[in-house]
Amino acid sequence: MTSNTMEAAATSAVRSRRDAPPRPGGGARLVRRRQRWGWLFVAPFAVVFAIFLVLPLGYAFGMSLFTSTLATGTEFTGLANYAKAFTDPLFLEGMLRVLAYAVVMIPAQLLVALVAALVLDTLATRVSKLSRLLIFVPYAIPVVIGALMWSFLYSPRFGPAATIFSMVGLDAPNFLAADSIFGSLVNIVTWQWAGYYMIVIYAALRSIDPTIYEAARIDGANGWQTATRIKLPMISSSMVMVITFALIGTLQFFTEPVVLRSVAQGAIDAAYTPNMYAFSLAFSYSQFNYASAIAFSLGALVFAGSTVFLFLTRKQSGLK
Amino acid sequence: MSSTTSTRATAPTDLTVATGVPAHQPRRGDGRGRSGGRRIGSHVFLIILAIYFITPLWWLIVAATKSNSGLFTGTGGPLWFDDQFAFFDNIAGLFTHQGGVYWRWFANSFLYAFAGGAGATILAILAGYGFAKYRFRGRGPFFTIVLASVMVPLTALVIPTFMLLSQMGLINTPWAVILPSLLNPFGVYLMRVYAQDAVPDELLEAARIDGAGELRTFAQVALPLLKPAIVTVLLLSVVGTWNNFFLPLAVLTDPELLPVTLGLNRWTALSNAGAGGEQVWNLITTGSFISIIPLILSFLFLQRYWQGGLAIGSVK
């Protein structure tokens, strides 16, 4: 493993070089020319960033400060739309609902992904390689198609549920009823994303220096101890990243409930999630100002939520 | 594999991951012999998981070969083939139903995903390299903003983006999907983290001393070293665009312009609404099956790149 340490030394040499001030021999003009090249490389992205991120956010915030009615036209109403949003039962219910989804869905996805990755990490057989690929496959299926497939699978008319449940002598539940739609959606999202998270976690596990395991084994650690006391702490930055993405995704829940809505009409309404509510306000009721306030509030809450999470886990995520 | 490994001789340890999760590492052999029982348990666990994850896809493959009535009253049940093999009839149906609009959707998906995804990747490569290898004024603050923007939910941008695009007169044009898809801050982040280590400063200095300009140094020295990250970011951006539902739903109403995902969703909604002549379940299943083939194939063929690439940025 000397090559590893050599590489590490080389990296740190590169590091210190990078962080050192520009060498005096280079000359100020050269440095300035380099500076310009740096900006040139970043510029195309910066333009897109300004037009499609900064501008829409600013525009949405601006829009949200106005109210337009047929009687009075458009007038400046300050934060009135926000006051309305945070007392709007439809918005608040939607927020609570996505929070409930986050509380159930993220641990479900993570547990499947983590256990699968830990098991895969101890095996290197053909079965394990094939399983790894099969578990990942749903991620390669577009979310809309995945949700469509599950809407068929859940369907009492042509889904296999009835067949499968009758094999064990049970009646299939109605997956699309109001009281079971929550679990049905959790299942779809877990099915779609657990494999992706598994690969991220697995790749992080593979990057752990194997000599550590050897040391642990000599110290008498068993498989469970190795997993919980060595592997888990060492991949904590990946876990933080995965949880952050899952959190951002869950709070914006949109595609799956929209797709399932046409088969589960009664169970999913137009304001099921805040995103769906904003969409229907804007495109069904043309309330663009209020929709902007909802979208902006949701964006701010997601941003705040993920930032707080990253702050709380800053030791693990390496963002100090 | 050896050719790819050799180019990375100078790269730090975590890049061995990026070469595609080397399954041939001669490690952990010792743990296996002792725990034969656990290995069987592990395998059973993996197989059960794999069955759960693959069954819906199996169902889709089977369903794609059935006629409309076969889907409801087939002889083999939902998880097995029907007596009547209607796959080719269904494909023919895709060519005739509504004037073959399905293939138009299919082409649209390719256009959007590749124009948006490839564009986003090019921007990410340039910006990531710029951030990693040049020191310029404002670099730190701008990169912090980019990093923070990863947490801005993109769907919060859809409604304002719609309003901006409509002012620019771009609603109901392909640009309305392609241009916003060029934004991929996470790709920039991945590319920077990767370029930082995979492109040694010494190599760039050497190229400059040899008289190569900045562009040539980038194209001939840096670019080849960035390959795994490029494949990963390209795949993630293409999948992101191909998957995007909210944006096209907001900015496209012309049926001719829809990507295949939205088109199929529209057929499903119509079929569920029970509209008389619109019950095209067989076309929906066959169309869905055909539409997922390109992405699945790209993941299969580019496996060794993205599997490791996904770990970039999370390892440290």
Image (cartoon, coloured by chain):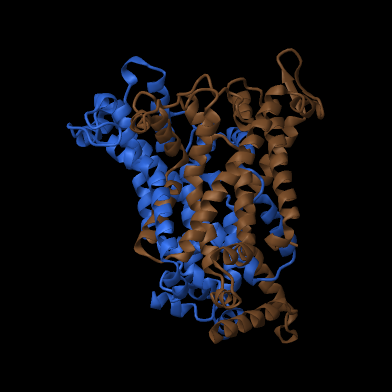
The percent coordinates of residue B44 (x first, y second) are: 39, 54
Tell me the shade of chain A.
brown
For the point 61% across and 25% down, the residue is: A271
Name the quarter where the N terminus of chain B is drawn. Answer: bottom left
Q: What quarter of the picture does the C terminus of chain B occupy? A: bottom right
B47 lies above or below B33: above
At 52% from the left and 49% from the top, the residue drawn is: A112
Question: What x and y, as percent, mark residue A13?
Answer: 66, 83
Q: Residue at x 50, y 48 (%)?
A: A194
User: As drawn, is A93 to the left or to the right of B85?
Assistant: right
Residue shown at 48% from the left, 56% from the top: B234
Q: Farthest right residue? A: A78
Near-viewer residue (B72 or A91): B72
Is A301 above or below relative to B205? Answer: above
User: B283 or A50, which is in the foreground?
Assistant: B283
Q: Is residue A319 visible?
A: no
Q: Is residue B54 above or below residue A67?
A: below
- The image quadrant of residue B105 is top left
Q: Nearer the viewer, residue B78 or A31?
A: B78
Residue B308: x and y in percent read 49, 64
- Total numbered circles: 0
Task: Indicate the chain coloured blue by its letter.
Answer: B
Asked if residue B109 is positioned above or below residue A263 in the image, the reply reads: below
Left or right relative to A31: residue B172 = left
Instruction: Write down the quadrant of residue B63 in the picture.
Output: top left
x and y percentages locating residue A133 in the rendered image? 40, 55
A173 and B227: which is toward the camera? A173
